[in-house]
């Protein structure tokens, strides 16, 4: 005779998409400080990101182009921090994700 025993509940808490998205939006201000974080990393000896960053900056022909690039870096950081990924996202959830108005 086989008796089905109830399975123990997963002890890990699970967030809804809405909860995860709301939490991620709280990280948007961190994106505004991306360059100060890069500087702190550089001072601490973490410089692996610098060659790529400096390579891209080398293509700027004017200070205006460089400022646009810097703004794109900030807005890209905000988008990455503001979106709960990896997570299964359905079409109806897309409107709740943070997308930078500047990058759109």
Image: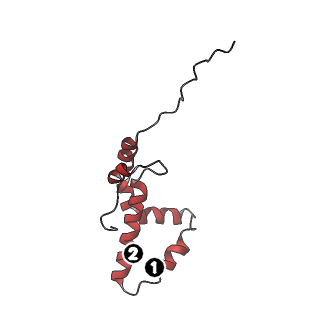
Residues at marks 1 and 2 touching, judged by CB atoms closer than 8 Å: yes
**Which residue is farthest left?**
101
Q: Residues within 10 Å of mark 2 (few under 14, many from 20)?
A: some
Left or right relative to 97: residue 4 = right
Q: Residue at x 36, y 49 (%)?
A: 93
Quadrant containing the C terminus is bottom left
Res. 19 mark: none
Residue identifier under label 2 = 69
Task: Find the distance from the CA under tag 1 to the CA under tag 2.
Answer: 8 Å
How many marks the image carries: the answer is 2
**Disc nearer the start of the sequence (1/2):** 1
Q: Is residue 28 visible?
A: yes
The quadrant holding residue 2 is: top right
Q: Position of residue 68 (x, y in %)?
A: 35, 76
Task: Give x and y (percent) for residue 97.
Answer: 36, 53
Q: Residue at x 39, y 59 (%)?
A: 79
């Amino acid at each position: 005779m086989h008796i089905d025993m109830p399975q123990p509940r997963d002890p890990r808490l699970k967030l809804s998409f809405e909860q995860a998205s709301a939490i991620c939006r709280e990280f948007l201000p961190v994106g505004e400080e991306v360059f100060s974080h890069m500087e702190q990393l550089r001072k601490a000896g973490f410089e692996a990101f610098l060659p790529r960053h400096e390579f891209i900056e080398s293509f700027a022909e004017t200070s205006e182009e460089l400022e646009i690039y810097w703004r794109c870096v900030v807005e890209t950081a905000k988008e990455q921090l503001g979106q709960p990924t990896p997570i299964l996202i359905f079409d109806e959830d897309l409107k709740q994700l943070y997308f930078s108005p500047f990058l759109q």
